[in-house]
Image: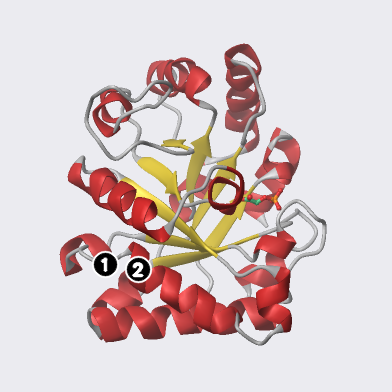
Amino acid sequence: MARRPVVAANWKMHKTHLEAIQTVQKLSYLLSKEDTDRIEVVVCPPFTALRAVQTIIEADRLPFALGAQDVHWEDRGAFTGEVSPPMLAALRVTHVIVGHSERRQHFGETDATVARKLRAVFGHDMTPILCVGETDDEREAGRATDVVTSQVREDASKVGPDQAARLVIAYEPVWAIGTGKACSPEDAGEAVRAIRDVLESMYSTDVAESVRVQYGGSVTAGNIREFMAVPEIDGALVGGASLDPEEFALIVKH
Ligand code: PGA
């Protein structure tokens, strides 16, 4: 089954709404229709830039999907500082990063909260980009596969097969994020195969073959081809290298 690769820009806590507009405009000059037909391109600005980026995508009919970097699981309520799924859906956000390791590490996110967020995103017809990955210590201890597969099991528990088939998973080893020390394509391929095996055991071969699995962690224009050459890998989640539209365009074009 042919899976359309998906390359997502995770800008993290970078760019004001004005800088975000400029970046998206530049990106639109650098990418052709052939590029975005071949690869789904998702831009994930900070919350404060979502409305501005939505407006420019719609006004100029840019072939980019709009993604958010996080979400709360409730539709509304007394949760100061949080943003809900319907608020994102109203901005025509189509993708939401869920369970990024920075949220797990610095903001106490657990598999239980990630699971709630995943269901909430699906509940509003958006596509979660579920991030999983092991730490340095876990890899050293030979536990990388166990950690990643148990994250998928717990985070996607209670997600039905129809929804699961639409999932995007980003395999992002924590030690590779923002360090310039990318995972080897062989190790990334092995982790992605393990992710598909667990999806097969939770759902079916069809679901396991439908889910798109990205690699993330120090992806650059210089190493993207090695990852895309691995048949199991269906794109990338890009942090630092996505901030520069020229480099990000090269990653999409690889
Ligand atoms: P990086 O970040 O590309 O800067 O390593 C990836 C991510 O956190 O999604």
- Label 1: how many residues lie within 10 Å, few (<14), some (14-19) or many (20+)? some
The label on residue 157 is: 1
Report x, y in % for residue 9.
Answer: 58, 42
As helix, strand or loop, the secondary structure at mark 1 comes to loop
Asked whether, in this view, residue 217 is left or right of residue 60, the answer is right
Q: Is residue 218 visible?
A: yes
Asked whether, in this view, residue 42 is left or right of residue 167, the answer is right
The label on residue 154 is: 2
Q: Quadrant of residue 157?
A: bottom left
Quarter in which the C terminus is drawn: bottom right
Q: Is residue 231 visible?
A: no
The label on residue 14 is: none
As helix, strand or loop, the secondary structure at mark 2 comes to helix
Q: Relative to 93, does residue 59 appear above or below in the rendering?
A: above
Q: Quadrant of residue 26?
A: top right
Give the residue at x 70% y 35%: 243
Q: Disc 1 marks which amino acid?
A: Ser
Q: Relative to 89, does residue 216 appear above or below in the rendering?
A: below
Give the residue at x 69% y 34%: 245
Q: Disc 2 marks which amino acid?
A: Glu
- Label 2: how many residues lie within 10 Å, few (<14), some (14-19) or many (20+)? some
Looking at the image, do the residues carrying marks 2 and 1 touch, with CB atoms under 8 Å apart? yes
Q: Relative to 20, does residue 108 appear above or below in the rendering?
A: below
Give the residue at x 26% y 80%: 202
Give the residue at x 58% y 26%: 24
Q: Relative to 8, does residue 63 appear above or below in the rendering?
A: above
Along the line of sight, the residue nearer the viewer: 63 or 209? 209
Along the line of sight, the residue nearer the viewer: 83 or 199? 83
